Amino acid sequence: MRLCLVEDIAASGLEPLTLTRPVHDLLLGSTTLSSKIARAFQVGPGPQRRGCVIRAHLAAAQRQRDPHLVVNDRDWLARGPVLVANSRWVPPVGFQVPEESGSWVGLCEGQPACAWVGPEDAVALEPHGVDSWFERIASRYDCTELDGEWIHRPWDLVAKNEAHLERDFEELAWRGVTNRHLTTMALVGPADRLSIHETARIDPYTVFDTTNGPISLGPNVWVQPFTRIEGPCSIGAETQLFRANLRGCVTIGPNCRIGGEVEAAIVHGYSNKYHEGFLGHAYVGEWVNLGAITSNSDLRNDYGEVRVPLQGDPIPTGQAKVGCFIGDHTRTGMGSMLNTGTAVGVMCNVLPAGILLPKHVPSFTAVLYGRVAPGFSLNQLFETARIVMGRRGKSFNEAEEQLYRTLYVQTRLERERAFQRSHEHRGDAWPVAQAARLDRPHAVR
């Protein structure tokens, strides 16, 4: 079976996380959404078996990031029958592939989630026409309810992460810890709920608590002294933990540097949170650096429903505990305080102000004295990205640069609206005005 992952128009509802990556690359539990769909249909890796149809501006960068996945290739679609799956759909536990002959459509909550079609139907797929394609296919072939669940918003990934960490641990059959590891650490809870790769380094005075869920550590993970990890939790390869307190429901991608307190959060690869500070009920993209003592709130004082300003418009979450969502290549300064339900775009520079910072920070902007303001030039941002990625043996290449140039144009109106709102409300927070006065050369104290 061949698998083609596609994005519908609702991919925009997962911004800022999907500004720089296709939906299928989002993390949930210990793996990506694409891995979960491929595992359900038992589709192996490699360009002969897996392809995708994604937004056009992502295509060039995605080909370089994942050379084993065919991207937006009509010739590949024409080679034979293919299973087309919406990347926002997560198949259910114990999923069974329908045994129907001929073409068919699988539904989740009454909406098309996947379809088995021939090449004559597959070649009609277009990056910005997936919704209408599924409508046409569903009107022509038999539809079967397959169950599963949809991912609509970034906070859905965080809320569902605990269950999927448990599920991935069971389905992937991760087990085992060496005697060498056991001699240096303290284990609380069942040993069969712990999986540590043999190459991982576990220093003395570290605690692993599997009482509430499983814990898995990938290759070459380094857990330094006075770190406590509570399950369910998944730590990606090459990640280092510095006196960290991981309080459960945490997914850390590869090559991260994590310290301080983390709870119910997902952090993509190559991001840093070296120092003290709290990160909770949050989703952080790649190449993000959270400065020392950066902390976010994940609960309102009145315990009410949290709203998140996606693209500047407040969206009800239906949840009381929602933290922050941060796009790729964003940095926060030392002591930054993020409000409940904050959304920060890509390539932002967030500086502390002694007060809670704006909840909506559009891409390519800065936060200065508590206000959203124009950020660095693209050339400056790109030069920083080259330095940051070069330190991890990666390159910020031409495809990446073109991706961010395109995003800069696409997000222009969102920035302009934010600047206008900031100007209209410039007098409603005296600490900001006071800070600006004290920063003047001739300020009187």
Image (cartoon, rainbow, N blue to C red):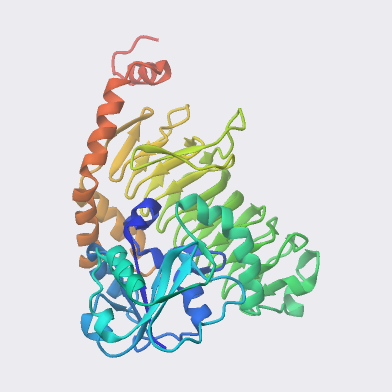
Q: Note whether 300 is above or below 19 in the view shown.
A: above
Give the total of numbered labels: 0
Q: Note whether 171 is above or below 87 in the view shown.
A: below
**Frontmost residue, 6 versus 97:** 97
Residue visible at 47% across and 58% down? 151
Farthest residue, direction top: 444
Q: Is residue 123 left or right of residue 270?
A: left
The x, y position of residue 59, in whole percent, is 25, 69
**Frontmost residue, 167 versus 217:** 167
Asked whether the viewer can see residue 275, the reply is no
Q: Note whether 342 is above or below 30 in the view shown.
A: above
**Frontmost residue, 127 versus 158:** 127
Residue visible at 36% across and 56% down? 10
Asked whether the viewer can see residue 150, the reply is yes
Quarter of the image for residue 428 reads: top left
Where is the C terminus found, in terms of image quarters?
Answer: top left
Residue visible at 37% across and 73% down? 5
The x, y position of residue 223, in whole percent, is 63, 64
The x, y position of residue 78, in whole percent, is 24, 86
Residue visible at 50% across and 87% down? 99
Where is the N terminus found, in terms of image quarters?
Answer: bottom left
Farthest residue, direction right: 189
